[in-house]
Image: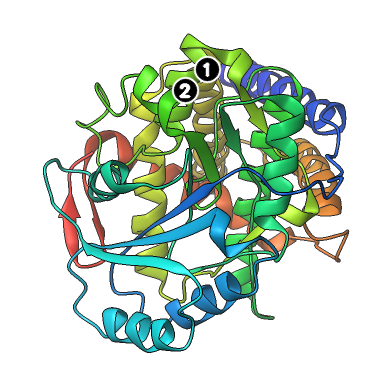
């Protein structure tokens, strides 16, 4: 009887958290850009490593930005790429001399390549706002214009923006989209409930003065990741009134899914490892609840196979979890993908196993990323 009560309690708590996130997504208003005269200066900082395959699409999207070139610069920090990334940039630079761009080699000082890359760029920035993205992203045309209007209206000093996968029509990409929608829904919903704690470095901006006011990455360098989430939480702990979320379809950055299963697992371990550095109690509790929910379902399946638990309990837990997960993703999908059809039945069955493995590995081990091994 005790195990039934335990599973039921965890499922109930998980459902409560997810329903609150679901309501928070609707609470956060969609921002409508007024297309005011651009005055805000942006320094687009892009840490890369071995992005030759993806860099042409990113550079092409930069060239199409609907923002005066004199009001932004592009700084690419190359973390010792072993491919043709620099040559691709140089070829693009020859035909796009109207843009202010810089290509630098990273200087490694800590165990966090991205933090080192951003720190490398900061002393040479020409504009007051840092806006970060990744080498495998595609930027929307009105990206900077929308950020400018949001900043002018809200007076924020740090802004998180939405990210979605640009997928092909295959199940493995849809599986990654499943998780992306869940994460983005959690991000938007938590901000809607005034409990923000998450963001994505592929679409993240802050003023250099606010960065230094927070103490930069001091206290965060022991984590291999966290140039985005941990910095955001640091800001929310100190000055939450200066942090906002830009909920606008004109600000959605698209990133590419990964085609290699092992690389996906390593990426998710890297993401999950950030949770060990969370400084916001709500974030810690949610991370624990999500991990417990997934572990509970996996445990229940194992018990059912050993005939120690009825299968009706298993599918009852799954039905409740799927209902609240899908509710969050449905509302998120309506914003990020304009309601494009998405019914992740197979992914919802497999995901608890995947999440349990990556969560446990993040707690007790390191991970590999782009040919290197990191400790959490």
Q: Which mark is residue 260?
A: none
Between 18 and 85, the one nearer to me in the picture: 85
Instruction: Name the residue at 41% across, 44% down.
Output: 271
Asked if marks 1 and 2 touch (Cβ < 8 Å), the reply is yes
- In the picture shown, does residue 169 fall above or below 368? below
- Quadrant in the rendering for residue 94: bottom left
Q: Quadrant of the N terminus?
A: top right
Secondary structure under the numbered disc 1 in the rendered image? helix
**Where in the figure is residue 337, as x and y percent of width and height?**
80, 60
Q: CA distance from mark 1 to mark 2?
A: 5 Å
Q: Is residue 284 visible?
A: yes
* Structural crowding at the residue carrying mark 1, measured as other residues with C-alpha within 10 Å and reported as few (<14), some (14–19) or many (≥20): many
Q: Quadrant of residue 71?
A: bottom right
86 with respect to 214 (left or right): left
* Residue toward you, 370 or 86: 86
Q: On the image, numbered disc 2 is attached to which residue? A: 233
- Circle 2 Cα neighbour tier, 10 Å, few/some/many (<14 / 14–19 / ≥20): many
Task: Say whether residue 312 is visible.
Answer: no
Q: Residue at x 55, y 33 (%)?
A: 198
Question: Circle 1 is placed at which residue position?
Answer: 236
């Amino acid at each position: 009887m005790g195990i039934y009560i335990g599973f039921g309690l965890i499922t109930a708590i998980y459902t409560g958290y997810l329903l609150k996130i679901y309501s928070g997504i609707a609470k956060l208003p969609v921002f409508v850009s007024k297309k005011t005269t651009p005055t805000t200066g942006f320094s687009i900082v892009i840490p890369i490593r071995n992005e030759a395959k993806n860099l042409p699409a990113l550079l092409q999207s930069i060239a199409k930005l609907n923002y005066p070139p004199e009001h932004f610069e592009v700084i690419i920090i190359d973390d010792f790429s072993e491919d043709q990334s620099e040559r691709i940039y140089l070829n693009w630079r020859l035909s796009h001399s109207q843009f202010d761009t810089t290509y630098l080699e990273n200087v490694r000082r800590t165990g966090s390549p991205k933090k080192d890359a951003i720190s490398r760029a900061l002393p040479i920035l020409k504009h007051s706002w840092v806006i970060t993205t990744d080498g495998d992203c595609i930027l929307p045309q009105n990206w900077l214009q929308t950020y400018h209007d949001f900043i002018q209206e809200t007076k924020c000093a740090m802004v998180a923006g939405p990210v979605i996968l640009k997928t092909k029509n295959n199940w493995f990409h849809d599986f990654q989209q499943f998780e992306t929608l869940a994460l983005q829904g959690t991000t938007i919903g938590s901000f809607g409930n005034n409990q923000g704690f998450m963001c994505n470095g592929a679409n993240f901006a802050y003023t250099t003065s606010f960065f230094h006011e927070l103490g930069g990455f001091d206290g965060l360098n022991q984590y291999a990741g966290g140039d985005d989430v941990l910095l955001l939480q640091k800001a929310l702990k100190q000055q939450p009134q200066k942090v906002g979320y830009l909920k606008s379809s004109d600000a959605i950055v698209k990133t590419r899914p990964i085609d290699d299963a092992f690389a996906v697992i390593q990426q998710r371990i890297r993401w999950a490892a950030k949770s060990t550095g969370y400084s916001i109690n709500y974030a810690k509790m949610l991370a624990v609840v999500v991990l417990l929910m997934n572990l509970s379902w996996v445990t229940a399946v194992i018990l059912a196979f050993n005939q120690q638990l009825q299968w009706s309990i298993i599918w009852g837990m799954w039905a409740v979890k799927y209902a609240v997960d899908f509710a969050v993703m449905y509302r998120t999908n309506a914003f990020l993908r304009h309601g494009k059809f998405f019914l992740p039945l197979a992914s919802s069955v497999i995901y608890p196993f995947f999440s349990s493995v990556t969560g446990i590995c993040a707690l007790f081990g390191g991970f590999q990323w782009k040919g290197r091994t990191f400790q959490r």
